[in-house]
Each structure stands twice: as C-alpha cells, then as structure tokens.
Amino acid sequence: MSAGPTAGTNTASPTDEVLFERRGHLGVITLNRPKAVNALTAGMAAAMLERLAAWADDDGVATILVHGSGERGLCAGGDIVAIYEDMLTGGDSTADFWRTEYQLNALIAGYPKPYVAFMDGLVLGGGVGISAHGSVRVVTERTRTGMPETTIGFVPDVGGTLLLSRSPGEAGTHAALTGAHLSGADALFLGMADHFVASANLPALAAALESETAEAAVGRFTEEPPASALAGQRHWIDACYAGDDVEEILRRLRAFDGGLSGEAADAADTIEAKSPTAVKVALESLRRAKGLTLEEALEQEYRVGLRILAGPDFREGIRAQVVDKDRNPQWKPARLHEVSAGDVERFFAPLGERELNLPSKEADNV
C-alpha cells in the first residue's frame, strides 16, 4: 500500500489536496488526491514549496517524508486535464504551474535535510520530480515509474531529461522515447531510486523515521531488489539507441536480431506511435542535458515546454489519451521525416524575459 503516518499534528495548508503534519522530528507531506492518483496541481506545488522552505529552517524537523494517499501510488504526474483546459483558453496557468513546480524540484534536489520519498505504486512524470531528486528514494515491488510524456505529445521534464541522461548506457534514452513504465528494480538500475523496501513495511518505516535517522531507519528495512528487466536488455538497447538520429535508431531497432519480432521491434513500434515532434525533441533534450546542472536542465525543459504548449501535439495527445480516450492521436506533422533539425532547434531558443532563471549552482557532471 502507499502508506505513511496516519496520525499526528496536522498543520494548515493552502489546499487540502496536500497535507502536512509533524510526527516526532519527522515532517510528513501527504499528496491527497487519491481518486486522481495524487496528480500534482499548481496549488499543491506551491504549498509544498512554501512548507519545505519553512521546514528547512526549523530545528524541530530533522527528516522529510513524502508519500501518497490511497492505494494506487505516490503521484501519477501533473494534472494534465487542467493543462488541457488552459491550452484551450490560451491561458498562462500552465507556464506559471511549471515555474513553481520546477522551483520545487530544484529545492528538493538541494534540500539540507534527508528527504525520503516513498515511490510506491504509480510514480510518473511530475511524480518523479517530487521524488527522484530527493536524497532517500524508496521503491517497492509495486512501483511503476517512468516518464511517459511522448505518449501525449510532450517530452520528459521536471528534471527527467537530466536523470535519464545519467542512466547506464542508453537505457535512459529507451525509457524516454518509449515512455515505458518501469519497475522499482528498473528505477534502481537507472539511478532514479536508492532503496528497495517491501510495500507492506512502509508504515513501519514511516514510524521509525519519527525518531531515528533516515539512514538508520531505511537501512533496517532495505531488502535486496529483484533483477531489473531493463538491465537485462542492455545488449540491444545500447547497440540501437546510440546517436542523435531517431530514424537511425528505428532502423537499428528494426534490424536487430535479424529483424525478428522481439523487444527491439516492439520498442520501434512503440516509438513510431508517439508524436514525431515529441520523440525528436525528447532525444535532443536528453543529449543536451548531459553535463548540465539540474537548474540548467530545468531551464532548458521550461523553454521546450513553452514551445510545445504553442504547438498542436500536446493538446492532441491529452485529448486522445485522457479526454476523448480514443487512443488515436492525429499528430502534426505525422511522420518523423517531416520534423527537420531546424524544427527541433527552435524548441531550445532562449525565451528572453520569460526565462525560468533558477539560482545557479556549480555544474554537476555525475
């Protein structure tokens, strides 16, 4: 179950969609939209940013825990229905949401106290942003994580391009282009998580965090993870995904193992069903993210995101997957060869006065 503390001293929040409480020296954040798998709204991101900033300077709080309410997961991503409605009306709410959300991602990454994330159940998109940048990332046998943005005509964001660019070999490229759901073991392999704990033990771990150090508590409950299926696919993933040309990647996937049906061919089928623009921009985003700081990667993602908002595919992808649910998006353009290098380049152009401009840190070349 997606579990955490169930009692304690609750504190006021600007929204009941995210709850805050103190238990011992533990500050607990509960995402509280269980019917929406705790999808992140602008109000939730703003409330978390404010509370985490306050707790950073509170000597009574030694450790932070973030978890999701309900049984389905930590967070299924950003509230894309709200984004869709904002695009239909030509509003600025999505840009403002992302600005706050990316500030939150950066704060979590540099947080001065242990930030423990229970990545149980679904942890997708924006859910990765509020967990995988933390210092103590716990996955379970129920974890299903990933960056599925290309399915809806978008690209990985919330620092996901940086996380996936650092993954072993080309595994992150495969995850980004296909939007595959990954297991907890896969998340450990990709470097998006640190510890494997049985889901049934999360309530006990949360209780231990109230009085013990994060290191001691998590250490007592950590188990040996199962094998990562993704790690077992490195032989064809690394061979096929190297390089900066999506068409060439697809040719390699189709030709691998004599062109016989299998995992590589399935990956090619999956990629070809995505938005051609999103796939090409996602690959370029990953390549450019290498060697950047998180702040620089978030600024790049913000540029790309605002440009995607102005195009047709993101809106069409949400319509097809979430609104009308016909699963039949009409991408524009519809074919990869119709998306030129110049088209891709324009997504990365400076925004001028609209730049995100997060406080910079020294480049982290991990």
Image (tube, rainbow, N blue to C red):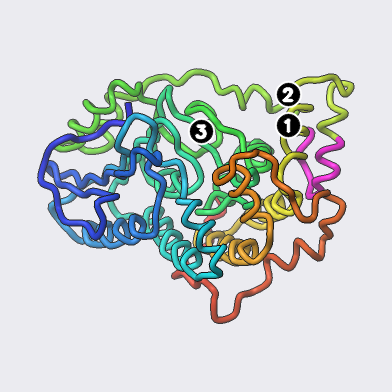
Q: Residues within 10 Å of mark 2 (few under 14, many from 20)?
A: some
At a point 45% along the width and 68% down the height, the residue shown is 96
Q: Amino acid at mark 1?
A: Ala
Q: Magenta: predominant secondary structure element? A: helix
Q: Which residue is mark 2?
A: 263
What residue is drawn where x is 29% and y is 46%? 114
Q: Which residues are magenta?
A: 239-251
Q: How many marks?
A: 3
Whichever of labels 1 and 3 marks the residue nearer the N terminus, that label is 3
Q: CA distance from mark 1 to mark 3?
A: 19 Å
> Residue 49: where, in percent of width, then height?
32, 60
Residue 31, x across and y down, in percent: 31, 45
Residue at position x 77%, y 34% from top? Answer: 268
Quadrant of the rendered structure where residue 141 is? top left
Q: What's the amino acid at mark 3?
A: Ala
Q: According to the image, label 1 marks what residue? A: 267
Residue 208 in the image: state x and y as whole percent: 19, 31
Confirm whether the magenta stretch covers residue 250: yes
Of residues 96 and 197, the one nearer the viewer is 96
Is disc 3 placed on a helix, strand or loop? helix
Q: Could you say where residue 1 lies in the image, as x and y percent from the top left?
A: 32, 26
In this rendering, the answer to whether 136 lies above or below 1 is below
Specify the quadrant of the image occupied by residue 297. bottom right
